[in-house]
Amino acid sequence: MKVAFVHVPIRHHGFSENLKVVDEEFTFSPPIVLAYVAAIAEKSGSKVILIDAAALKLSKEQVRKKLEIFRPDFIMFRLDTYCFHDTLDWIRFLKKTIAVPVIAGGINFSLYPRETMSYSEIDFGFIGEAVETLPEFLENFPGGKYKHIAGLCRRNEKDEVIINPANLKLADFDSYPFPARHLLPNQLYHSFVSQRKNFTIMLTSTGCPWKCTFCAIAGLAHYRERSAESVLAEIEKCYYDFDVREIDFFDATFFVNRERCLKIFEGIIKRKLDINWTCRSRVDLVDEEILRAAKKSGLRMIFWGIESGNAGTLENINKEINLSQTEKAIAVSRKLGIRNLGFLMAGNPGEKAEDIKETLKWAKKLKLDFVQICRAIPKPGSKMHFDVVRETGYDYWKEFVLGREGEKRIYVPGVALSQRKIESLLKKMYYGFYFRPVFILRTLTRLRSFGELARYVKVALRMIGHYFHTDIGAAGKPDFVKKSAHSGEG
């Protein structure tokens, strides 16, 4: 079988938690999940291509021409809820001339399988993991003996949607092949804060053991780790085969398993791999000993889930950390020469304007190197999302997938601030943090390349321009109006 994977460009959306400039400039990373699935298909014996239309800046027409040359038996896409209609638009265009079945997967199928399959352009979908089900499907498709496969979504002879129950048993993460980076333009990837080429992202675990109310990962993915040996083997492959010198470990929460982490750090040092790496972490998982070992193995920066400088807000979002833990973790990290980026939020339940201003003041006090600030939204699959559905009887995301809702800011329970006020406060937080002379001078002294400087200047200019622009919902409708109970399609 010949299978083509297509990664479509990602854009900013009206319901996004980020400012437009942040969505478009913060990271330009490889489509790692799609690369995993491509590797699974390739390992099963299929001939595979992966077209990253975003990285290569390809138009729909240019992708169509590549597919016509390859002549696939299937075209595969990853569907997430945010980008659902963008991806659907690409599928519709390509199917006009590439008359082969479309297979889709992704988190949207776990949430809204029937709604997703209501679009005839999508021929097959998979709920859950592809490591076993996709090879089985590809092997049995020519003989028509695929209809029993767990998690498969399809249509029968009467054009009725059939959804097979998914296999809830999690595969051993070590059994996955490494992502198919040989199919990707690895030299093109970077993040806003990356300093070395080539840059890539890597997953060493899935899910998260904690249950923050705003996070979809906590609600949709069970925590599961790869062994240190598997992680080190992939790092070596990236280093020697793809000239990778900077890795962003894209786990939701690194440092969970202390023993495993120490084995990874020791392995990097023992193999004399000249890499830098970054990761995401909670502040209550680290101490000086483990951070010192991480630094010795190449750790350059940690992205901390700080969220707020207000104790009441942290309690409301079930963060299960306190301010003193954050202050200690950042202080130890700075002492060791590790740089720090803080993930912050605005507009959480129960939050007042004074609380948001307090968070900015606290972020400055922590002497963070960077911040990324987002507005609280009920992300698909998060506890906050399900709370909204229970309270209102209306599921915005389901209606959005069905095409009955446009892009707009979404009602958040317990938030008295208007979306326009939150937007204003969020911008002031960004400007109040980044446009300080002390921050600008410190950043300039740490530059490693002209390319890094160019990224910072570009984003700064865009942020200045964005200050005078608002992208809240539709014109004339800046705030989301809470819906009354709705009996819509189940």
Image (tube, helix red, strand yellow):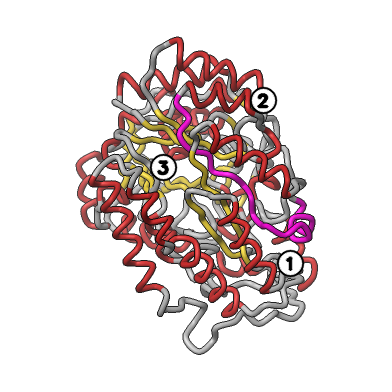
Q: What amino acid is found at the position of numbered circle 2 in the picture?
A: Asn
Specify the label residue 31 is tagged with: 3
For label 2, the residue is 257
**Residues in magenta?**
298-318
Quadrant in the rendering for residue 287: top right
* Most distant residue in the bottom direction: 476
Please tell me how crowded label 3 is: few (under 14), some (14-19), or many (20+) other residues with Cα within 10 Å.
many
The answer to the question of whether label 1 and label 3 lie on touching residues, with beta carbons closer than 8 A, is: no
Please tell me how crowded label 2 is: few (under 14), some (14-19), or many (20+) other residues with Cα within 10 Å.
few
User: Which label's residue is closer to the chain start, 1 or 2?
Assistant: 2
For label 1, the residue is 349
On the picture, is 239 further left or further right than 315?
left
**Marks 3/2: CA–CA distance:** 26 Å
Q: How many marks?
A: 3
**Residue 169 percent location from the top left of the image:** 69, 30
Q: Is residue 238 above or below residue 409?
A: above
Q: Is residue 287 magenta?
A: no
